[in-house]
Image: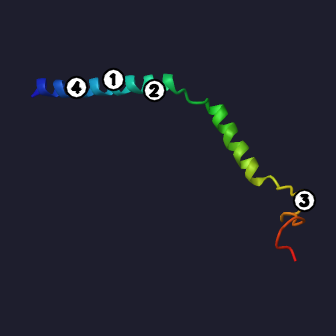
């Protein structure tokens, strides 16, 4: 029984090492931004949500050359 347990544990460790190797290759191809960049991006998004909207002109279009204007 002890030899079978060693076999199962070693098989599982090999599987975990293979998964870690695959994840490392993916991380090399597609690097993630640093934690500082991700936090800055979140704060910029929150700031955009709460910034007041400036409307410089009327919200409706000007109807000077509209064919059905009466």
In the picture, the quarter occupied by the N terminus is: top left
Picture residue at 50% right of the left edge, 24% below the top: 29
Q: Secondary structure at mark 2?
A: helix
Viewer-side residue, 59 vs 19: 59
Whether tag 4 and tag 1 are in contact, CB under 8 A, the answer is no
Q: Which residue is mark 3?
A: 57
Mark 3 vs mark 1, foreground winner is 3
- Dot 4, crowdedness within 10 Å: few (<14), some or many (≥20)? few
Q: Nearer the viewer, residue 69 or 18?
A: 69
| Cα distance between the residues tagged 3 and 2 | 49 Å
The Cα–Cα distance between marks 2 and 4, rounded to whole angstroms, is: 23 Å
Q: How is the image coloured?
A: rainbow
Question: What residue sits right under mark 4 in the picture?
Answer: 11
The answer to whether mark 2 and mark 4 are in CB contact below 8 A is no
Tell me: 11 left or right of 46: left
Of the numbered discs 3 and 1, the one sitting upstream in the chain is: 1
Residue at the image position 44 percent from the left and 23 percent from the top: 24
Between disc 4 and disc 3, the foreground one is 3
Q: Residues within 10 Å of mark 3 (few under 14, many from 20)?
A: few
Q: Name the residue furthest bottom.
A: 70
Which numbered disc flags the more N-terminal residue, 3 or 2?
Answer: 2
The residue at which mark 1 appears reads as: 17
Instruction: State the image quarter where residue 33 is shown.
Output: top right
Extreme-left residue of the structure: 1
* Position in image of residue 55 (x %, y %): 87, 58
How far apart in space, not on screen, are marks 4 and 1 (Cα)?
Answer: 10 Å
Q: Is residue 35 above or below residue 29?
A: below
> In the picture shown, does residue 15 fall above or below 65?
above
Q: Quarter of the image holding residue 34?
A: top right
Pointer 4 or 1: first along the chain: 4
- Disc 2 to disc 1: CB gap under 8 Å: no
């Amino acid at each position: 029984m002890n030899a079978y347990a060693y076999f199962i544990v070693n098989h599982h460790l090999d599987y975990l090492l293979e998964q870690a190797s695959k994840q490392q290759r993916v991380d090399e191809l597609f690097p993630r931004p640093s934690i500082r960049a991700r936090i800055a991006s979140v704060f910029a998004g929150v700031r955009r949500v709460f910034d007041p909207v400036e409307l410089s002109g009327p919200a409706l279009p000007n109807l000077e050359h509209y064919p059905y204007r009466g």
